[in-house]
Amino acid sequence: MGGPIGVGFLGCGPVTQAIHLPTLATMPERFRVARVMDVNRDVAGAVAARCGAAPSVAENEVYDDPVVEIVVVCSPNAAHAEQVIASCRAGKRVVLCEKPLAVSRAEGDEIARVALETNTPIIVGTMHAYDPAYRAAYAAWEELEESASFVLSSIYLPANGVFINQATDEVELAAAAPAQGAGDHSDPAFQAMMIRNAMLGLAIHNVPLIRELYSSVGQMLSARFLRPFGYALAMRHEEQVASLQALMPGVWPPHWNLRAIGRKNELNIAFPPSYVLAGSSRSELIAEGETRVFEGPRNGYEAMWTHVGEVAAGAAEPRISLDVIVSDLGFAFDLADGAEEILMAKP
Amino acid sequence: MTQKFTAHVPKAAPAAALHRSVLATLPNHFDVVGSSNADAVLIDGFSVERHISARVLVLDGLPSAALSLTPSSIVVPAHQFAPRLLADKNFAAARAIPFSLINIEVDTARPDDDLLPRALLEQLAAVRLLASGAPRLTSVERCGRGFVATGTVAGRDIWVTLTSFPSPVGAAKLSLAAVSPTHRLRVDVDATAIARPAAIRLLGPDGSVEGIQVYQNSHRLTWLKVHELLSSPTAGVELSVGDVNEDLETVHEWLP
């Protein structure tokens, strides 16, 4: 086996700095950050200096660098599709794209087409889908041949900065990020747009997990935008009901839970917040009156990167197939479309 | 010295055994009598008129129509969960907070459709107590063996989601999450054990506040409330007959 695999980043914002670089720092034998690109030259330089990588302000330098075998797309959402496709065409071994994979269904389809054409494995950074405790609990749930009657995803989070600042010293920028939720909150079109943003930015984290329990959006029953940034959606598909709720930022401790009630069994998953390597979820499977608890020291980010390494080495196929990745994205759009229909129909 | 009153629990009442076991732990407060001519009478929703002379009626059931009572009548609903919420200091503190979202899940003890209206009634009471306003449902969708309901609270910018499904393990319980940017309330009431304390945490900028837990079930708290109403002329009820009737009407409208 060779040395560490070269990794290149497109975008050096908080996700790169607070999530991926600290995670990769725990796996120096497997990965080496070879090149980091950011449109802000100072940021690229500062981040590169931290991890011993070469800085770039041009995307092409990442695609053209033969040392870079894994491309990590951490740029603004609107750039994801173009950069994933370019990485595929550059012949990279694996592309890890932060969620969402794309900002339209057409972009998702185009990524799938190019990934198939170039035989490039695509992995989306939905870290909870790799959380070892969740995976173990879900495997046990599947063994019971259980299906969910009711699924509840509830996400109540403090501001991201609370956790970013605990995960790393972020490169200081002069410009502040635009405030979330500025606009006319009474305007249904604004509410629909905010929910769409929330589906692609927040709900998307759990979409692969929700879809393992509740496969299709079906009929949207209710949708509400919650200020300053959140949502409450309820939907039904055949004999299943799902409820998705989120609110942020708050000044209380985080809550990131997934609950599924089946006929005879129940799943309760409590995930740690994003950014920090705080171990796995605490996953409970209540079956036949007994509670099995799954919990461990490894976080979803760590498990995801281990998987990326295995796929890059040709030792494994992506755990989440390309078809599923694209249909997960479609599910997020279905959520946003269903919510928009309800909000815009209100008198 | 505690003043004693008489309580009547009809043998035919569905939850008679539970109420009797609870009253057995309040021997200084009540004498359980066989006659319906008592200070307080347990009613199941179908026998109100027969017991109109009682000073307090404890309602443990789901009347098929609104209660028709004189203005001086006092009705105390024997909810499974609400009294435990009211007994908690964190819940009391949370009642002043303008939440954005209230989500309540009630797991019923059995996969029995008859339990769903009662579950909704419990949820409506909890919303009413927490939000200090009347729940206004905009949809209730029956699905499989449960339901999902959504709505608001009259005069408040609060979104309400209520769901109820049978517990896979036969454990009747209520889980409540109320969220605003400044506070988050988390309630878990497991009604399987007679005195398992409710876990009620109010989370805010100063962290979590948790007091000494209450090791009493809702019915004991209800009967203590009945005693307070009988012994103190200034004692009031949290849910008026009008509130109860309004919630009953909502239940019958959406889950006929």
Image (cartoon, rainbow, N blue to C red):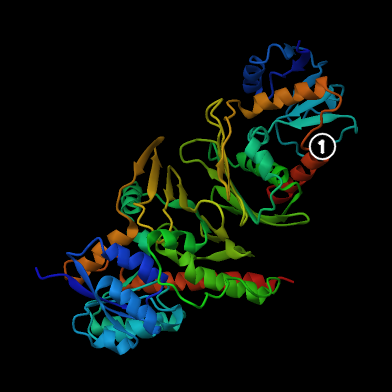
Query: Does B106 sit above or below residue B224?
Result: below
Residue visible at 64% across and 29% down in the picture? B218
Q: Closer to the camera, A333 or A79? A: A79
Residue visible at 87% across and 33% down in the picture? B69
Which image quarter is the N terminus of chain B in?
Answer: top right
Residue visible at 34% across and 73% down in the picture? A323
Q: Closer to the camera, A128 or B6? A: A128
Query: Does A258 sit above or below residue B45?
Result: below
Query: Callout 1: helix, strand or loop?
Result: helix
Residue visible at 46% across and 69% down in the picture? A331
Residue B238 in the image, given as x and y percentages of width and height? 77, 36
Q: What residue type is labelled 1?
A: Val
Left or right placement of residue A267 versus residue A222 in this view: left
Left or right placement of residue B73 versus residue A81 in this view: right
Can residue B141 be spotted in the picture?
yes
Q: Closer to the camera, A333 or B232? A: B232
Number of numbered discs present?
Answer: 1
Query: Does B61 sit above or below residue A87?
Result: above
Most distant residue in the right direction: B71
Residue B100 in the image, given as x and y percentages of width and height? 65, 57
Q: Name the residue under label 1.
A: B241
Residue B148 in the image, given as x and y percentages of width and height? 60, 53
Please report, as a chain letter, where disc 1 is located. Answer: B
Query: Does A90 sit above or below residue B255?
Result: below
CA neighbours of label 1 inside 10 A, class few (<14), some (14 to 19), many (20+) = many
Q: Closer to the camera, B56 or A26? A: A26
Can residue A10 be spotted in the picture?
no
